[in-house]
Image: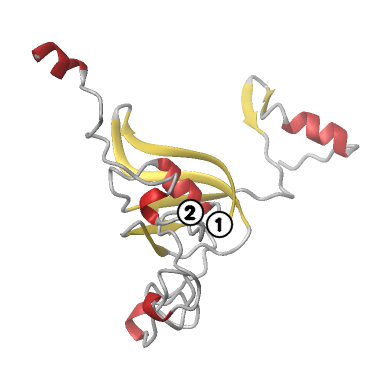
Amino acid sequence: MVVTFSSKAVKDAALNEHSISIAGCSVLLGDCENKVSIVKTCELPDEMPDSVVICRLAHYGRIISFQCDRVEDAILNGVHTVRMFIEQPIPAKTFIAGEFVCFWYPSQPKTCCNCGSEDHLAAACKSQRSFNCERPGHCAKQCDMPALCRVCLADSHETSTCPFNYYSSNVTGAKSAKHAEMS
């Protein structure tokens, strides 16, 4: 159902409610003028925190929400759902902190996983993509850009000092409660 409003102020007030009740049913409200896309991620390593993926996706648009998908209440399925305003196409496969990560969203342009080009797919690729600047036509060794962080693509620090750097979730500096009891 499409609803029009008498003014932008009325529309903004209605959209702040997120949902309304019609005939006892909760109906979600969305802004058709500002299309939010649902982006799915997969093949993320378990130890890669959400902040790394959110940081990378922020290069392609504005993130609204990020959540881990579940099979059951406590069982993660390895897929993440990101709601965002996409400002430039997101590659189907990208290299983040030494790992390939896949992204998918409706109307995503089909691109070559090797070089990022839209005019062919990986099976017919004779080119490559720089995993430094993410542009096609050259590899990272030939890239004329300064070395970029492999997590957030900033040129102000190295990957090892990135504030979004991932860590192993099962290794901490503090003793766990169970380990402390046994000591």
Residue under label 2, please give it.
56
Cα distance in 3D space between marks 2 and 1? 6 Å
Q: Residue furthest left?
A: 182
Q: Residue 159, located in which quarter of the rendered image?
A: bottom left
User: Front-most of 104 and 150?
Assistant: 150
**Residue at the spot x=56%, y=64% of the render?**
89
Q: Is residue 39 above or below residue 176?
A: below
Q: Which mark is residue 59?
A: 1
Residue 98 horizontal side relative to residue 23, left or right: left
Looking at the image, is 145 positioned above or below residue 157?
below
Residue type, label 1: His
Q: Nearer the viewer, residue 97 or 79?
A: 97
Picture residue at 51% right of the left edge, 61% below the top: 155
Marks 2 & 1, CB-CB < 8 Å contact: yes
Question: Where's residue 131, x and y in %?
Answer: 40, 69
Q: Quadrant of the C terminus?
A: top left
Q: Residue at x 49, y 45 (%)?
A: 82
Q: Secondary structure at mark 1?
A: loop
**Where, by quadrant of the figure, is residue 163 drawn?**
top left
Foreground: 50 or 102?
50
- How packed mark 2 is, by other alpha carbons closer than 10 Å (few <14, some 14-19, many 20 or more), is some
